[in-house]
Image: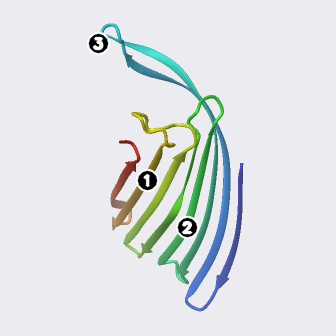
Amino acid sequence: FDTSLSKKWASENTVTKITIKSTTQKRRYTVVNRVLDEDDEEEFFLREGSRNWLYQFTNLILDVSSSDDSKKLGLGIYHTSRIDLSRNSTFHEYGPGILYEFQSNRVGLKSSVRYLVRNYTKLSPGAGNDRPLRYNYLRANLELDYTVSGNSEMYWRANAINRMSNNP
């Protein structure tokens, strides 16, 4: 289920748009894990499990584009909630992000950075630490496209994720 509301303003050189978008998804699937046998440390067995999750994504994004769409700057606030309907791995994730895009006849560049905090409601890091588990993510993406000729394109894509936690 998707809902999106936008408002756009145009001036001589720029187009400004603010968007709030909300998406709800239900995910249910079966997983199979390979688990080490506790009695015989050289043997493994398969354990089947299931996931029954409800996701809620909400984003507030401000885009400022050049009137010819060659450049775009986006600032956003992002929120994700995962409600675990069968186990205890519910979390809420939120944080700011920035996006920059450039497009010419031959070159396209897209880069983004997000800093997200993920708080689990019931999971704890363990080892005597009973605070709820928390991750801090720094996610960076870079995409570069280059048109060599009419039908040929080269591209380079890079993603970097740094995850830190309160796990001792």
Query: In the figure, is residue 94 to the left or right of 154?
Result: right
The residue nearer to you, when weighing 150 against 138, is 138
Residue 138 drawn at (x, y percent)? 40, 57
Give the crowd class for mark 2: few <14, some 14-19, many >=20 residues within 10 Å. some
> Who's the residue at 51% across and 50% down the image?
118
Q: Nearer the viewer, mark 2 or mark 1?
A: 1
Farthest residue to the front: give it: 128
Element assignment for label 1: strand
What is the distance, in whole Å, between disc 3 and disc 1 at their CAs? 34 Å
Which residue is denoted by mark 3 in the rendering?
A: 41
Element assignment for label 3: loop
Position above or below: 14 against 22:
below
Residue 155 drawn at (x, y percent)? 33, 59
- The answer to the question of whether label 2 and label 1 lie on touching residues, with beta carbons closer than 8 A, is no
Position above or below: 57 against 39:
below
Which residue is denoted by mark 1 in the rendering?
A: 136
Query: In the figure, is residue 129 to the left or right of 3?
Result: left
Quadrant including the C terminus: top left
> Who's the residue at 39% across and 18% down the image?
35
What is the distance, in whole Å, between disc 2 and disc 1 at their CAs? 17 Å
Which residue is denoted by mark 2 in the rendering?
A: 76
- The amino acid pointed to by label 1 is Asn
Position above or below: 119 against 114:
above
Numbered circles on residues, count: 3
